[in-house]
């Protein structure tokens, strides 16, 4: 029998396209994570998030919207697991 988990884990990468200030856009996007009750670890290529589903999905959306606000065209790559 499979056990259900209350948390999700996600590996996410923000990729601003056609900009010269991509580091600034990424860093400002990552700052939005402090608003949420999730744990996260920022790596050199991606960030790993762990938390309750509603908090994690909201954090992902906020990260994306902040990056778009600053950079217009943005790609977000996210891998989510409940295991």
Image: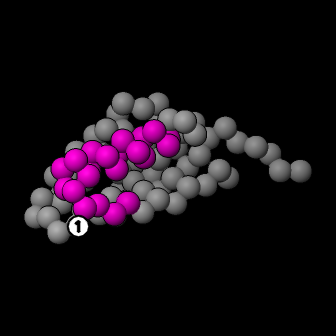
Disc tally is 1
Instruction: Give the percent coordinates (x, y) of residue 62.
Output: 36, 41
Identity of the residue drawn at 25% across and 61% down: 73
Horizontally, is 5 left or right of 35 in the view?
Answer: right
Q: Residue 61, located in which quarter of the rendered image?
A: top left
Identity of the residue drawn at 50% across and 41% down: 56
Q: State the residue lying farthest toward the bottom.
A: 18
Q: Nearer the viewer, residue 37 or 61?
A: 61
Horizontally, is 71 left or right of 7 in the view?
Answer: left
Rendered image coloring scheme: one colour
Horizontally, is 2 left or right of 77 in the view?
Answer: right
Q: Nearer the viewer, residue 66 or 44?
A: 66
Judge the density around disc 1: few (<14), some (14-19), many (≥20) Cα neighbours within 10 Å. Answer: some
68 to 6, vertically: above or below: below
Q: Is residue 46 on the magenta stretch?
A: no
Horizontally, is 48 left or right of 82 in the view?
Answer: left
Callout 1 secondary element = loop
Instruction: Give the percent coordinates (x, y) of residue 70.
Output: 18, 50
Q: State the residue lying farthest toward the left.
A: 20
Instruction: Give the percent coordinates (x, y) of residue 15.
Output: 29, 63
Magenta span of residues: 56-76
Identity of the residue drawn at 54% across and 36% down: 54
> In this figure, which residue is indicated by the disc labeled 1?
17
48 to 58, vertically: above or below: below
45 to 39, vertically: above or below: below
Majority secondary structure of magenta residues: helix
Taking the image as drawn, is residue 27 in sight?
no
Q: Is residue 65 on the magenta stretch?
A: yes
């Amino acid at each position: 029998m499979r056990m259900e988990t209350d948390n999700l884990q996600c590996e996410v990468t923000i990729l601003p396209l056609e900009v010269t200030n991509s580091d600034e856009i990424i860093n400002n996007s990552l700052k939005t994570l402090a608003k949420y009750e999730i744990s996260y670890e920022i790596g050199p290529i991606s960030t790993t998030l762990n938390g309750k589903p509603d908090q994690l999905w909201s954090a992902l959306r906020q990260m994306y919207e902040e990056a778009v606000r600053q950079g217009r065209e943005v790609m977000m790559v996210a891998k989510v697991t409940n295991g």
